[in-house]
Amino acid sequence: MLSMRLFITRNSSLAASAAIMLSCFCVLSSFSQTPSPSAGQSGTPRPSPVSTPAYDPTRPEAQPDLSLDHDPILSPDPEDNTAINPAAPTTERAGALKKGQNGVYTLHEDVDEVLLSCTVIDEKGEPVLDLKRENFFVWEDGAPQETNSFQHQDQPVSMGIVVDNSGSMIDKRGAVKTATLNLLRESNPKDAAFVVNFSDRAFLDQGFTSDASALDKGLSRFDSKGPTAMYDAVAASADELSKHAKQPKQVLLIVTDGADNASHLGLEQAIRRVQNLGGPVVYSIGLLYDASKEDSARAKAALDTLSQETGGIAYFPRALDDVDKIAAEVARDIRNQYTIGYHSSTPSSQEGYRVVHVEARAPNHGRLIVRTRKGYFTKRPSAQPTQTAQEIKTQP
């Protein structure tokens, strides 16, 4: 304390000295600011100021044309500084910036390439893995399309794992978790997945990760209660894929043991939402062996339709022990798909649903069956409701 007090006293003295010096400086400054001698007085004459127009307060101030858009920051390229008339009709071009009504500029690109993930099997149901680009034929709305890209290699996948969390699943979750983790182990090491558990609502219990232990924890979160809102969970999971997936190849794996009885969305609405969001391939595992006949029939029809429309397949094991084998088959199917791309012959400006049909033909293979999505929408919907890290919310 003593040393601190001495320090304060010493600084107070210095402050007083500084104040005296500042006062002297101000006095000297006031004497030095005497008027400079003008013309006719002794000393150097002061130059005459340049004449400027007198300010006329009655003259209206010049205003820029408010009907035009002016960028407040000038570009080094003079042509980019030209004012734009928003009311004038313009033709959008690829790569052009367009200002919307909300003042936000958007980069427009004409992206009309359609990518199809295709699985090919023979009449015995065995996968066919030796096809080339020339073996595939694509039609869109009945018109033949020319393929411009082709791949047949193990590509990383972004996957959503969507598991029924309703009360009837309490005795099945252990086997489902084991089978799902085995599927992930047999998949590409660069795959990333998230986990959604659903009953009457869908919860994102683990976001995108390649960490097996984190996915294990997500699959272990189980609250056995509530009805089954599968369609809402599927739509919300497709939205999660569209927002956060880093890989263009996308998959949803659905595991459930009953028919939907609580969703706001219907089956057709859920399928359209999935197709609108880029069309991930949907694989379904329906554990319906102990469900009522009526419930089993409804659930089977829904899972079949959902998978077939997106290029996936629905499995219906006869016992819980079969789930692990099915999961391994799904992993192989995903890793052995062909990816075909084409530029649609129909302009991208024509909105609506387009039907896609793909065939494969090759010598010495007999009849080949191609499984891929059946169509797509050219215009994606507006942004979906905001999601939290804990709960995925859907709206009808």
Image (cartoon, helix red, strand yellow):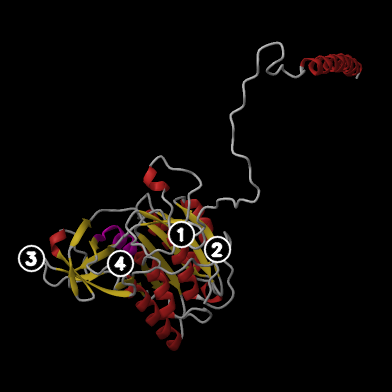
Residue 83 at what x, y percent from top left? 43, 52
Mark 3 crowdedness (10 Å alpha carbons): few <14, some 14-19, many ≥20: few
* Mark 2: secondary structure: loop
Q: Earlier in the sequence, mark 4 or mark 3?
A: 4
Characterize the magenta stretch by its predominant secondary structure. Answer: helix
* Amino acid at dot 2: Gln
* Amino acid at dot 1: Lys
Q: Earlier in the sequence, mark 1 or mark 2?
A: 1
Quarter of the picture holding the N terminus: top right
Q: Is residue 132 left or right of residue 374?
A: left
Measured in 3D between alpha carbons, the distance from the residue under mark 2 to the one under mark 3, in whole angstroms, is: 50 Å
**For the magenta stretch, what is the residue range?**
328-340
Observer-side mark, 3 or 1, equals 1
Mark 1 crowdedness (10 Å alpha carbons): few <14, some 14-19, many ≥20: few
* Mark 3: secondary structure: loop
Q: Which residue is mark 2?
A: 387
Q: Which residue is mark 3?
A: 363
* Amino acid at dot 4: Ser
Q: Which residue is mark 1?
A: 243
- Is residue 129 or residue 361 the one in the foreground? 361
Residue in the picture at 49% in, 63% down:
101
Label placed on residue 348: 4
Q: Earlier in the sequence, mark 2 or mark 3?
A: 3
Q: Is residue 282 visible?
A: yes
- Whether pointer 4 and pointer 3 mark residues with C-beta atoms closer than 8 Å, the reply is no
Mark 2 crowdedness (10 Å alpha carbons): few <14, some 14-19, many ≥20: some
Q: Earlier in the sequence, mark 4 or mark 2?
A: 4
Q: Is residue 54 left or right of residue 114?
A: right
Depicted 139 relative to depicted 266: above or below: above
